[in-house]
Amino acid sequence: METNQEIISDLQGLVNIVNDGKEGYEYAAQTTESTELRAIFEKYAAQRAAYATELKDHIAVHGGHSDNEEGGILGTLHRAWIDIKQGLSSKEYAAVLGAIETGEKAAIEKFDACLEDYADHADHIELLQRQRTGILEALKEIETYHQRLEK
């Protein structure tokens, strides 16, 4: 069984992930010329901000804290959001959406890793499952929009 500090660390890692997503979506919303994409990006930026708040509240329940408001340096996910910025600078919407898909898939993998430790995360398993479902729904919407662009 994980110690309380390891549980806090897992949750802090998820805060980093959702904040990375929030930043990526905010940047994408500010940079896109498409009003439809801007609305989608703003919706998911707000969702991720809410997820971070919920996770931080739960970290506090475990006696920890997270001052993270900006995400973290997280290998694959960080590179995915950098790809978004590069795609936006060239106004390549398909590239932007592909980079977002990569980031969302990495976030789902991180949530899945925590969800595998059901016993250790039992007191917040519903929160993690709900947030993972929200990320998956975002991924599906982005994939659908991406497929429409490729037609």
Image: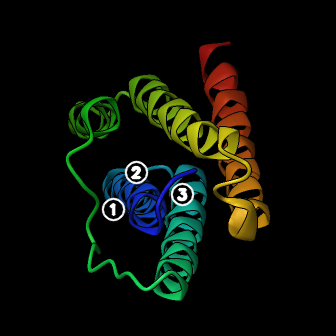
Mark number, residue 118? none
Q: Contact, CB < 8 Å: mark 2 with mark 1?
A: no
* CA separation in Å, label 1 and label 3: 10 Å
Give residue 61's quadrant in the image.
Answer: bottom right
Q: Residues within 10 Å of mark 3 (few under 14, many from 20)?
A: few
Q: Which of disc 3 and disc 1 is earlier in sequence? A: 1
Relative to 12, is 36 above or below? above
The amino acid sitting under disc 2 is Glu
Helix, strand, or loop for circle 2? loop
Q: Residue at x 32, y 37 (%)?
A: 84
The amino acid sitting under disc 3 is Thr
Residue 92, percent across and down?
36, 27
Of badges 2 and 1, the one in the foreground is 1
Q: Residue at x 38, y 50 (%)?
A: 32
Relative to 74, is 12 above or below? below
Q: Residues within 10 Å of mark 1 (few under 14, many from 20)?
A: few
Relative to 100, is 31 above or below? below
Relative to 136, is 29 above or below? below
Helix, strand, or loop for circle 3? helix
Q: Residue at x 53, y 38 (%)?
A: 104
Q: Residue at x 31, y 54 (%)?
A: 31
Residue 56, percent across and down?
47, 79
Of badges 1 and 3, the one in the foreground is 1
Residue of label 2: 33
Q: Quadrant of the C terminus?
A: top right
Mark number, residue 35? 3
* CA separation in Å, label 2 and label 1: 8 Å
The amino acid sitting under disc 1 is Gln
Helix, strand, or loop for circle 1? helix
- Which one is in front, 11 or 77? 11
Residue 142, percent across and down?
63, 37
Residue of label 1: 30
